[in-house]
């Protein structure tokens, strides 16, 4: 009886190993935590040009400004120098080289001009965000 019991035990163990081996290779990797992405991005290129120059967004959107230029840019709402048109844009502010920052939520349906406060006459650094 003792051998029989031992044999049954080994058989059960064998089945267990086979089942385990069969599924071992296909275990899915844990999915990484999703990074929040903002589809509304204005990028200042290495040649100091902001693009896109015109961007249409729904009310409540935030705009991510990315500074890929080698120098800093102070991105603010029109008008200059008061910056009162769309105050949420002023949250972007000073971006050093390589820095990026989001605006506040653009909740008012209107067109928001922006510019580099330190270079207010540069058309390369001006643009419009249409909130509608
Ligand atoms: Cu300004």
Image (cartoon, grey):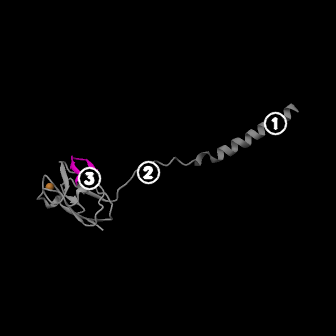
Res 66 label: 3
Ligand 1 is found in which quarter of the picture?
Answer: bottom left
> What secondary structure is found at the residue carrying circle 3?
strand
Lower position in the chain sequence, tag 3 or tag 1 = 1
Image location of residue 68, percent across then percent down: 23, 51
Image location of residue 6, percent across then percent down: 81, 33
- Towards the viewer: 97 or 75: 75
Crowdedness near tag 3: few (<14), some (14–19) or many (≥20) residues, C-alpha within 10 Å: many
Crowdedness near tag 1: few (<14), some (14–19) or many (≥20) residues, C-alpha within 10 Å: few
- Towards the viewer: 38 or 17: 38
Image location of residue 94, percent across then percent down: 20, 48
- Residue range corresponding to the magenta coloring: 90-102
> What secondary structure is found at the residue carrying circle 1?
helix
Residue beneath the point at 31% across and 57% down:
105
- Towards the viewer: 112 or 55: 112
Q: Residue 67: tell me if it is visible.
A: no
Q: In which quarter of the image is the C terminus?
A: bottom left
Image location of residue 53, percent across then percent down: 22, 63
Res 109 label: none
Magenta region includes residue 96: yes
Mark 3 and mark 1: Cα distance apart in space? 69 Å
Mark 3 touches mark 1? (CB < 8 Å): no
Q: In which quarter of the image is the N terminus?
A: top right
State the residue position of label 2: 34
Magenta region includes residue 124: no
Mark 2 and mark 3: Cα distance apart in space? 20 Å
Q: Residue 80: tell me if it is visible.
A: yes
State the residue position of label 1: 7
Lower position in the chain sequence, tag 2 or tag 3 = 2
Mark 1 and mark 2: Cα distance apart in space? 50 Å
């Amino acid at each position: 009886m003792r051998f029989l019991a031992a044999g049954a035990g080994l058989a059960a163990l064998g089945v267990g190993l086979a089942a385990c081996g069969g599924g071992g290779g296909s275990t899915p990797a844990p999915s990484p935590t999703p990074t929040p992405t903002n589809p509304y991005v204005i990028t200042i290129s290495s040649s100091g040009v902001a693009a896109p120059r015109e961007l249409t967004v729904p009310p409540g959107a935030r705009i991510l400004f990315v500074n890929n230029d080698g120098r800093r840019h102070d991105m603010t709402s029109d008008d200059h120098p008061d910056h009162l048109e769309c105050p949420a844009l002023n949250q972007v502010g000073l971006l050093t080289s390589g820095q990026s920052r989001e605006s506040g939520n653009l909740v008012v349906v209107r067109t928001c001009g922006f510019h580099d406060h330190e270079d207010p006459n540069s058309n390369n650094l001006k643009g419009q965000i249409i909130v509608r």
